[in-house]
Every structure is written in C-alpha cells, then in structure tokens.
Image (spheres, rainbow, N blue to C red):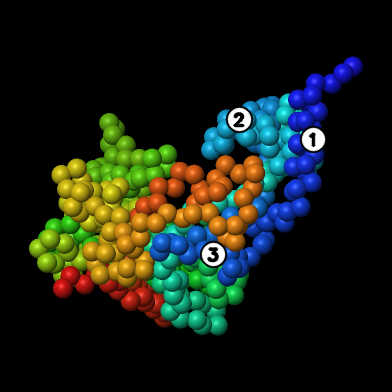
Amino acid sequence: MKRDRDEVEEEGNEERNKRKMEIVWQTPAHPAQKQDYIFHNGKRHVRPYYFEFVSHVNKRWEGKTIVDLFAQEFRGRSRDYYVSAVKCGRIQVDGENIPVSYIVKRCQKISHFLHRHEPPVMAWDVEVLQNEPDVLTICKPASVPVHPCGQYRKNTVLGILQAEYGLAPLYPIHRLDRLVSGLLIVAKNPAKADIFRQHIEAGLVQKQYVAKVVGVFPDAEQVVDANIDYNAREGRSTAEVGISNGDTTLKGKAACTKFTRISTNGIYSIVLCEPVTGRTHQIRVHLQCTGHPIANDMLYLSDDVSRSTLGTTADRAASLSGGSPETSCESHKEEYKYCSEDFSIDPMCTHCPNLAPNGYDGHEEGLWLHCVRYTGPEWVYECPYPDWASLT
C-alpha cells in the first residue's frame, strides 16, 4: 500500500527531532551556577535550560489520554504542542515513549522535558549579613522567592546563594513572601533548623518588620486582633472581625499584630510591625484594617486611596526613594533582543526567542515591607533598615 507523502515527511521530521535531542536534561539535583544568570535592564534573568518536570498520575487524571491530560491540566500551551511533544518523546510515561492515544494509569510517572524559562527578578544583591558555623543570615531583596516554587528554581535566594557563594545545602527556618525584603535566617544543617523550628512552634520567637504606609499612623500603639482567611485561588487574604455564633462562623485563622509608629511626614508613616501569629499576608491585611495600608501594596490598597499616586511598582518605588538607577527599570527602556551567545533557541519552545516566559508583564512589584529583627531564646539576628524607611 502506497504511503502518503505527508505521513512520510512527518515521520522524517520526528526522527530528526529525536537526533537533535542530544541535550543534558536538568533535574532539581543539578545546582545553579554563576554563569546561569544574565543581567539586563536592572533584572536578573536565568539562561533558559532544559528541564525534566516529573508528576505522578492521581485519581483525577486516571483514565485520560496523555494529550487530554496535559491539554486540560496544563493550559499554558496549546493542544497541538502537546501532541508534538508526545510524538517526539518530550512527554514520556514511566521513562518510555508512548502514542498520543495512550491512556494513563494511577501512580504512573509522567515526565515532561522542556526548555525552561524562569521569570526575572530584580538584580539587587543577596547580601550575607552573618556567616556562622551553623547559621547564615542574609538580607533578602524584594521580588526574589526564598526557595524553588512555581516557575522559579534558579532565580531564588537558595539558588543564588549556591551559585554565587557555593553555599548548599541550606535550610530556611522562616518564610518571607517573594515581594517582601529583609532578614532571612538559614540553618546550615537539619539539626540546627529543627532547633529554630521548635522555638518558633513554642511561641518563643519575636518578629519585627517595618512598613511604609499611607497617611499619618496613630501615635499610640495599635493592636489588630482579626482572623485571617486566605483565598488561594485569588491569592489574597481578608480580615474577619467579630465573634462566631449560631448564625455566623468565622472561617479564618486567629491572627494578631501590634503596630507602633516610628515616624511620619504627613503623607506617609513608617510603622514597626510585630506579628504575634504568622498568617498569610497578615501584616498587609491588618494594616489595611487600620486604614493605613502599605503605600505601594496594589493588592490591599483601599478603593478610596488614589492608586495612581500612592500605588507604585518596585521600580517606581526605587526611583521615588532614592534607589540606584542601575536597579530601576524606569531608567531603561530597551527590551531584550535575542543573542545566540546567551542561549540556543529550542524549535519546540513556546517562549523562545524571548528571555522571559510568556505572560511576564515586565513589572516587578516590591513591597514597602521589610523584616528587621528576629529574637529567640538567647539569640538575636538583625537586618539594616531599607532606604525607603527614611522620610527625611
């Protein structure tokens, strides 16, 4: 039987793609290297690299075809892409190539080999404050996540410390949101990390942050005691004030924060924030409750606050607070232009030739919220105040 010419050409293309895949596929075990980074327009980018994403078939996925699974669960790419990826072996099941009609079974290992583009972060240094035998403290810059999560792997505090200082493995003992800057305490071994975690879980650790808020904050100490309900789908929290009774039930978790004004210039105030509990976005939401939200917090600025004048991006904030022009994208208008010396274009990649992934809008948010001090049993660690904390 004579075969269709298009069918023969398609098979030939697939074979050529397979021969081209002489690629080193990275996994989480591959360490970040100093040469992995590209600095452009005040941002730290990661050179795109080949990576194996691994997942296992769960109950919801079981019984779907491999293409339907990816098209329905991972919508960042088109169905046609997933068909091509299966045909050329970039999507595998249990380490084997499979047809596009393959139906997955529970607990099978699914590998997706792709050209990974990480979002950029601001190019501020990850400064080491103290380097002790068992403990490392750093000043975390805003916009950089602490550890690998979501689209970020090398563009993280742990990745940068490994690449630039050779420090690994490390064990963060507390959390700082990506948009928050300041003190981060990291243990160098699991035993020391466990001691810190025991102190935190026993309520023996006091935390202090500074925030730059809208308006004149009251002179007297303010205590906000309001439950926090975090909505993971929306990525934001709400405060619940009141008492549960037969008619209403508070869904959120108990949360309490103490606030003390440090200074004010009549437009902004610098406030010391002492969270008694540790809920998601707790300081941000509780400051919103006081009527004095963080002045560049676009997520929690009240409707009656002029976002055009008070809500700013991290880049704009840097220029308004005397930040270095080298780290403010407002001073750079040139977009990245592909250079073959930076990385090789992958013919199947949906992000190439761009350096950043599709959907990245180019605006990095960095909050005016900074961790300055952690105190525990017989130990204290501190971080300098940021430039924006001075209102003079």
**Between discs 1 and 2, the one toward the N terminus:** 1
Residue type highlighted by circle 2? Arg
The quadrant in which residue 241 appears is: top left
Q: Which residue is mark 1?
A: 12
- What crowding class fits label 2: few (fewer than 14 Cα within 10 Å), some (14-19), or many (20 or more)? some
Q: Which residue is mark 2?
A: 79
Q: Is residue 144 above or below residue 311?
A: below
Q: Would residue 122 be found to the left or right of residue 94 on screen?
A: left
Q: Is residue 161 above or below residue 93?
A: below
Q: Nearer the viewer, mark 1 or mark 2?
A: 1
- The residue at the point 39 percent across, 78 percent down is 380
Q: Where is residue 382 shown, x and y percent of the image?
A: 36, 77
Name of the residue lying farthest toward the top: 1
Q: Where the N terminus falls, by quadrant? A: top right
Real-space Cα separation, disc 3 to disc 2, in angstroms: 31 Å
Q: Which residue is mark 3?
A: 37
Q: Nearer the viewer, mark 3 or mark 1?
A: 1
- The residue at the point 52 percent across, 49 percent down is 354
* Residue 173 vs residue 366, the one in the foreground: 366
Q: How many marks?
A: 3
Inspect this view and state whether residue 188 appears.
Answer: no
Real-space Cα separation, disc 3 to disc 1, in angstroms: 36 Å
- The residue at the point 79 percent across, 35 percent down is 12
Real-space Cα separation, disc 1 to disc 2, in angstroms: 22 Å
* Residue 124 vs residue 280, the one in the foreground: 124
**Between discs 3 and 1, the one toward the N terminus:** 1
Residue type highlighted by circle 1? Gly
Q: Would residue 358 be found to the left or right of residue 258 on screen?
A: right
Which element carries disc 3, helix, strand or loop?
A: strand
